[in-house]
Image (tube, rainbow, N blue to C red):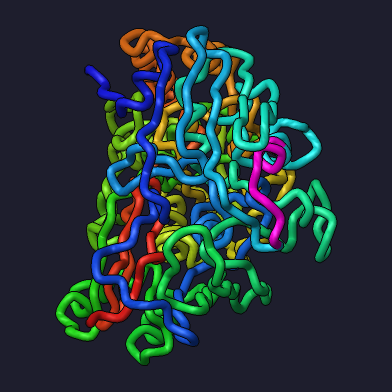
Amino acid sequence: MNVVYPATFRRLRIGSVVLATLLTVGFAAQAFGQGMPAPSPNATLTIGIGVDLDTVDPAQQTTTTVQNVIDYGLQTLVAFDTQGKIKPLLATSWETSKDGLTLTFKLRQGVKFHDGTPFNAEAVAFSLDRLISGKVKVPIGAGFKSMQSIEAVNPTTVAVHLKHPDPNLLPNLSTTMASIFSPTSASKDGNSPTNIVHPVGTGPYQFTHWTKGSEVVYTRVDDYWGQKPYYKTVDFKIIPEANSREAGLLAGQLDVIMNPPVTDLQSLSQNSAVKLLKAPSDRSVFIAINTTKPPFDNVKVRQALNYAVDKNAIIKNVMFDSVNPMDSAFPSSLTGYCKVGAYDYNPDKAKQLLSEAGVKNLKITLGSPTGRYIQDIQFAQAISGYLRKVGIDANVRTMDWPSYVSAMLNKNGPFDLHVLGWAPGALDGPTQLQMFTGGSIPPKGLNTSFFSTPAIDKLASEAALNLDEASRHQQLCQIQKDVWQQAPWIFLWSQTLILAYNSKITGVSYLPNEKFETMAVHPKP
């Protein structure tokens, strides 16, 4: 199989000089639509999301929904556009050295942070250094490990020095973890250099307040460096139940909601007051198996769990065909993907493997969030039912998202298995590998199956350094086959991002890394 990498990836891969095209000052990747009305003096956009934030620190957050919120106030050097191509944002251009060991950025001038301090190279160095200093917990930090140091060459130039050439660093620098914030703010309003609770960035909105379990509010920045958005205030409402989010939308209390009930998609599509957006996503949804807990340290038991669950029946009857079954450890949208196969529904095979492993009368706890993924608690309960059919007593347990994250990061925690989704922000295969390698086992990362093997770790390290696309793809494909056989997950499906919004507004869009785009939303003329 031949893999076609985006042009940016290919150019970086061979270490040649890359000079990005300058974009007109504005949102860059978050471009406004045509006909944007003048900014409103008081209008509020309300967005319903399913989970509370675990943090507002860009480096320490753990999921795309939280990133969507944080992105309203913070910006990165570069960003993805809707086609998955890298575009300038706070950087206007960049180039790589011939040896591939230095990535140099020219910075946008005339930009200020929300506290009035200047955006400059020192701020970039301060922010990016947090990702590699070892002083800050960075759960999604594996994509930055190639960075050796960050040098502020002059106020408008930053040089990122690498340990080795890394074709995936540039797209990783587009992710929320690499957001740039004011160094001056790091010691104010409850902040510390290692823990940000009041982020101060350069975006079109500034963080106002977060009421845990209720809402997060952002206010428009009147002297924003680019074109100003329409809404004065953006209010993210935290509503775990999909039916409640839908009710808020239909009652006019919410303008946009994430993941409406899939059972109602047909009726919503026929409602003239509502618009639906179904966007492709790079998110794998799976059941992570704690491979350190007996009997799940036995590969036969993990394979048995995969054979025990009728994924196709769940996709049809619980997910209403809104997702696509996984056929590899990578979703098909990622670079390096190759199709591996399937664990067909075979309860007799599952029972045989459990018997061979000496497992009987097994009682387990299956953790699931409520409102983070499409039909999450519902499909967790369905999976529990299938496990009971092969003799495994699976009790489903749910909790709020911040508590859930803490529980799944603890290998001695309450969950034997837990529902999780993973969407690589950089759209690259190596970011997916964070979930299968020892370097990302908590507390270093989010490999919450606590799975790794010397062979997979070695091959992943070699692939990360391999600048030959064909052989690199072969390595990534072999890893996918090995992971599939080792089964640290119950492999489920790739999720679709579904948004429902008031038909009186326009400008709702998405990015291919499971982020929604609502900066350009405004009322229809």
Q: Residue at x 73, y 39 (%)?
A: 126
Q: Quadrant of residue 222?
A: bottom right
Q: Residue at x 78, y 33 (%)?
A: 134
Residue furthest left as drawn: 270
- Residue 383 relative to residue 195: left or right: left
Residue furthest front as drawn: 110
Question: For residue 123: magenta?
Answer: yes
Whether residue 489 is visible: yes
Give the position of the N terminus as an image quadrant.
Answer: top left
Coordinates of residue 182 in the picture (x, y in percent): 71, 52
Q: Residue at x 72, y 49 (%)?
A: 413
Q: Residue at x 58, y 35 (%)?
A: 296
How many numbered dots are placed on residues in this image? Answer: 0
Residue 385 versus residue 424 in the image, above or below:
below
* Residue closer to the observer: 395 or 393: 395
Coordinates of residue 89 in the picture (x, y in percent): 47, 45
Residue 415 versus residue 147 in the image, above or below:
below
Residue 78 versus residue 153 in the image, above or below:
below
Range of magenta residues: 116-125
